[in-house]
Image (spheres, grey):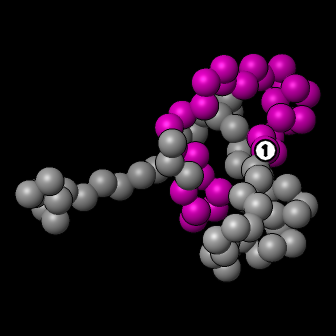
Amino acid sequence: MSKYNNDYYFLFRETDERIPLMTADEETVSRKYAYQAALVGEKPFVFHNGSIDWQKANKTKPLSVPPDVLFNGADVLVD
């Protein structure tokens, strides 16, 4: 970790139609998750695959194991 300040990584969303589209559920949206941090003790933010209907309609099989990094606009979820 001594070179921590010398290492930089740029993340780009892969263009693969099988990757889940991180979409907030209604309760998470109502909590303005994009603008306000969750408070200690609050329920966690909940997301689902927002592209599942499109994937089914186009017979695109979603990935069985999602990637370690998912995107929701400019927000990043890292496993």
Residue at the far front in the pictured view:
41
Q: Nearer the viewer, residue 63 or 41?
A: 41
Residue under the point 83% across and 67% down: 29
Q: Position of residue 28 (x, y in %)?
A: 81, 64
Q: Secondary structure at mark 1?
A: strand
Residue 77 at x, y = what percent?
56, 52
> In the image shown, does 46 or 54 lie closer to the viewer?
46
Q: Residue 37 occupies which quadrant of the picture?
A: bottom right
Say if residue 39 shows up in the picture. yes
Place of residue 14 in the rendered image (x, y in percent of width and height, measured from the top left):
52, 40
**Residue 47 position (above or below residue 19):** below
Where, by quadrant of the figure, is residue 72 drawn?
Answer: bottom right
Q: Residues within 10 Å of mark 1 (few under 14, many from 20)?
A: few
Assess whether residue 73 is covered by the magenta stretch: yes
Q: Is residue 19 magenta?
A: no
Total tally of numbered discs in the picture: 1
Q: Which residue is mark 1?
A: 48
**Does residue 11 appear to the left or right of 36 in the view shown?**
left
The reply to whether residue 13 is visible in this rendering is no
Boundaries of the magenta span: 48-76
Q: Residue furthest left?
A: 2
Tell me: residue 64, above or below residue 50: above
The amino acid type, in three-letter code, at marker 1 is His
